[in-house]
Image (spheres, rainbow, N blue to C red):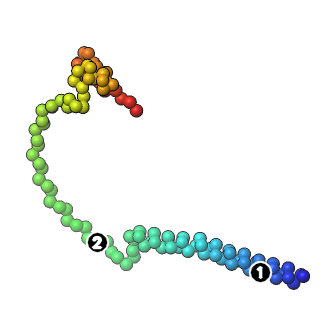
Amino acid sequence: MDDDLNEKTVSRRHALSRLGVLAVAAYTIPTVAMVSAAHASSGVSKLSEPSEPSEPSEPSEPTSPTSPTSPTGPSSSEVPVDQAGCEAADGTWDVETGTCLPSITG
């Protein structure tokens, strides 16, 4: 009976050691691959030399300024032009300026 118990202990130890080796490999292999890929994509290489700087390009010609357009005012479909339309659109009519102040709801 002691031999049977001893064999089970040895096989458990053997199984745990295999499991440990697999765990170490599972963590080590992806880490080494990631570090290798990061090193490869870093762009630094001991074998290549930096390239010569390129010549600056010719400056572009300035464009002629455009004259400002005259303001056309708000579109009648966007902002009501009278007090009734303003209140219907949930706005506030400003009597002093005769404009509609839209309500801000969030």
Determine the residue positioned at 26% across, 20% down.
84
Q: Residue 26 location in percent, x, y?
A: 59, 73
Residue 4 visible in the shown view: yes
What is the three-letter code of the residue carrying label 1?
Answer: Ser
Note whether 99 is above or below 8 in the view shown: above
* Quarter occupied by residue 70: top left
> From this viewpoint, which residue is outermost toward the right?
1
What is the three-letter code of the residue carrying label 2?
Answer: Ser
In front of the other: 27 or 8: 8
Note whether 1 is above or below 76 in the view shown: below
- Mark identifier at residue 11: 1
Note whether 6 is above or below 38 in the view shown: below
Q: CA distance from mark 1 to mark 2?
A: 62 Å
In the shown orientation, is residue 105 left or right of residue 82? right
In front of the other: 65 or 68: 68
Contact? badges 1 and 2 (CB < 8 Å): no
Query: How many marks on residues?
Result: 2
Q: Residue 15 location in percent, x, y?
A: 72, 78
Determine the residue positioned at 64% across, 72% down.
23
Q: Residue 71 location in percent, x, y?
A: 15, 31
Q: Which residue lies under the disc numbered 2?
A: 51
